[in-house]
Each structure stands twice: as structure tokens, then as C-alpha cells.
Amino acid sequence: MKIAVLPGDGIGPEVTAEAVKVLEALELPGLILFDGDVGGAAYKAHGHPLPPETLTLARECDAVLFGAVGDPDCDNLERHLRPEQAILGLRKELGLFANLRPAKVFAGLEHLSPLAPEKAAAIDMMFVRELNGDVYFGDKGTRQGKDGSREGWDMMSYTEKEVTRIAQVAFRTARAGNDKTRVTSVDKANVLETSQVWRDAVNAAAGAHPDIELDHMYVDNAAMQIISHPERFGVILTGNLFGDILSDLASAAVGSIGLLASASMGERQTAHGLFGLYEPIHGSAPDIAGQGKANPMATILSAAMMLRHSFGLNAEAERIEAAVAAALGDGIRGGDLGGSHGTEAIGQAVLERL
Ligand code: IPM
Ligand code: MG
């Protein structure tokens, strides 16, 4: 079991260090961890946010544990050299087209949500976001516009095949989560051709899954319903751009972005399962970097997702999740949750409860 650990920028190294301690504490036979540079840190060391040796390392491993990328020092670099290109490049180069982002309020933390407690308690949704297509990866550029001024343009597109494969992931995910058999596909089919193809392809793919309750929602309405009626969502299937926006919206509704994990997967089978990249939803938080203040729980929970999805180690994943829940239950709180526990203290608290 080979894992590439890519800490990245800002709080990335601090939070991944705690997740690594948790993985090591499980004493999994055959586990080997490799470190790689990524993001602004890699740009500073190698002149590129995703150096070839990091990409090769990721390809040779069975899974990637990713911290965060983003560095204010790099804000003025050309786009292809910015830290964010590292995560986009990894997703594309490794064929990681399916992004799973659970948004759920932990028991006892309902008060951290800006929603009313009964609404907050009802938040338990799973985003299945397409990650290799859409306006993110279309042709783009700047040119002289019809009015004579500079014009920026980005091509949005989805093929039926791209939509079908992510829809299959959503249907499989819905079936795996017993109480989440409803899939809501989110698009903007009232305006965009891309979304019409999306909707048609999702409907066609649903034919093979009569047990799944499928509905469609326009993205603007979805943004409203996620806040006003979170209880009506199970799995939310959507494209790259809408998924980016709505998953942040949902994490704000949960009120504890420092607890939200994610998995990105494709189709590559390794000797142990499905290859995947696992990262916390939060970013590099340069304002608190290096101060030992960041909450590592989202990264620790991402490591749990890795054990489950890439190694089939469900019992070990549950051990980690139970340890995090127990630490929260015992009042261990990072600053993001209104508490004062530091990064290492939180990591230690989880280790003690494993
Ligand atoms: C995310 C992030 C990335 C995205 C950025 C860092 C490129 O916001 O993972 O949601 O837009 O996908
Ligand atoms: Mg985002």
C-alpha cells in the first residue's frame, strides 16, 4: 500500500502531518508513505507547481493524501504556474473525474451552523461533482471583443460519455448510502446547451437504475433549496463549476469547514482497490499557516475516506471516524469550531481515541 503524501502550502503541511500520524498508528501491514512537493512550495523549489517527479510519484502510488495549495506569494504568476494548477493538473492527469464531498453536521455541532438547529441537523448530503470537464478544462483565452474592448472567454462543454460516467458514480453512491437513494441532478438546462446534454444523458443513464429516485433542479434553485430545505437532498450530482460553488455553499451551511473531507476518483484499479486522491475541502489558510492553529480533522477524515475507497479497509476507516467523533464529543475543538485546541493537540486527541 503506497501512499503519496503531498502537503502543499499554508496549513497543508501541518494538517497532513497529523493525518500521517493517525495512519501510522494503525500499523497497517505494508503501508509505505512517500512525500512529494506540490503547489507554491513546489514552484519555489522546482519552478513548477506540479513537477514531473510529483506526478510520477502519484502515478506509482495507490492513493494520494493531499493537503492544500494556494500561496499569496504566487498570485501574480502566470496562470499555468499558480499553485491551483497543481490540483487541477493532478485531477486531469490522473483521470480523477469523480469528486465525492460529503456535507454533514456532526451530532452536537448543530449550533455551529448558521441555519436553525433542526435544519442544520437535517444536513446530510453527498456531492458527486464531475472533475475533469466543464468550463474548467475548455479552451480559454482573451481577445478583442465586438465592442473593441478586451474580452475573456472560456468554453463550457460536456459530452454524453462524460456525463454518463459521472452519473453512474452518483447512482452507485446513492445505492451504497442506505438512506440516500435520491439523486438530484443540478444543471442550468433552461439556459445552457451543455446542461441540456447533461440532463438528457443523466436521464438515459437512470434507465438502468429504477430503484433510484432521480430529480433535476436548476442550479439557482438548488442554491436556495440547500439552505431552505436541506432535508430533501441525498446525493447531488453536478458538473465541475456548479459543484465547486454548491459544495462551498453546503460547507458554510454545515458551519465547520475544518471537518469536511473529500475523495477524487477515476477508474484506475490498483493491487488494493480504486486509485484516488483525498483532501480536505478547506484551502491553505495562509493567514494562520505555521502557527499550529489549523484543525487537522478534515484531513484525518480524508485519510479515513482513503482507507475505505482505495483500500477497502472499512473497519479502519470507521475507527478513525469514531475517534474524531469521540474527540468532538469530548469537547476537543479547533479555532474554526470556536475552540482553542491547536493542530497537534487535536491530532493527539484523535490518536488517543483510536
Ligand atoms: C476546490 C477548489 C479548486 C476548484 C481550486 C483550488 C482550483 O476550489 O477543490 O473546490 O475550483 O476545484
Ligand atoms: Mg472550491
Image (spheres, helix red, strand yellow):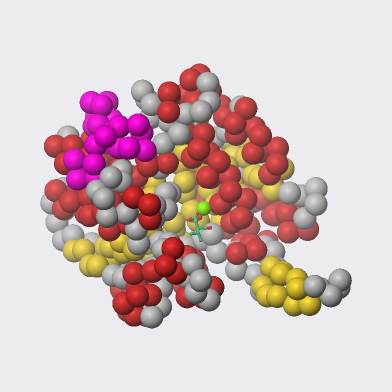
> Which residue is nearer to you in this view: 278 or 40?
40
Q: Where is residue 15 in the image (x, y as percent from the top left)?
A: 28, 51
Residue located farthest toward the top when viewing the structure as drawn:
118
Whether residue 100 is visible here, answered yes or no, is yes
Image-based side of 258 in relation to 330, left or right: right
Q: Which residue is at 84% across, 75% downward? A: 148
Q: Which residue is at 54% across, 59% downward? A: 131
> Which residue is nearer to you in this view: 49 or 229?
49
On whether residue 340 falls in the magenta region, the answer is yes
Give, as a single range, the part of the protein colored magenta.
324-345
Q: Position of residue 22 (x, y in %)?
A: 19, 48
Q: Which residue is at 70% across, 37% downward? A: 221
On whether residue 128 falls in the magenta region, the answer is no
Q: Quadrant of the C terminus?
A: top left
Is 115 drawn above or below residue 354 in the view shown?
Answer: above
Is 84 drawn above or below residue 329 in the view shown?
Answer: below
Q: Position of residue 89 (x, y in %)?
A: 47, 70
Q: Which residue is at 30% across, 37% downward? A: 334
Q: Write down the quadrant of residue 10 in the picture.
A: bottom left
Image-based side of 284 in relation to 351, left or right: right
Image-based side of 271 in relation to 179, left or right: left
Image-based side of 211 in relation to 105, left or right: right
> Which residue is nearer to you in this view: 149 or 106?
149
Q: Position of residue 18 (x, y in %)?
A: 22, 50
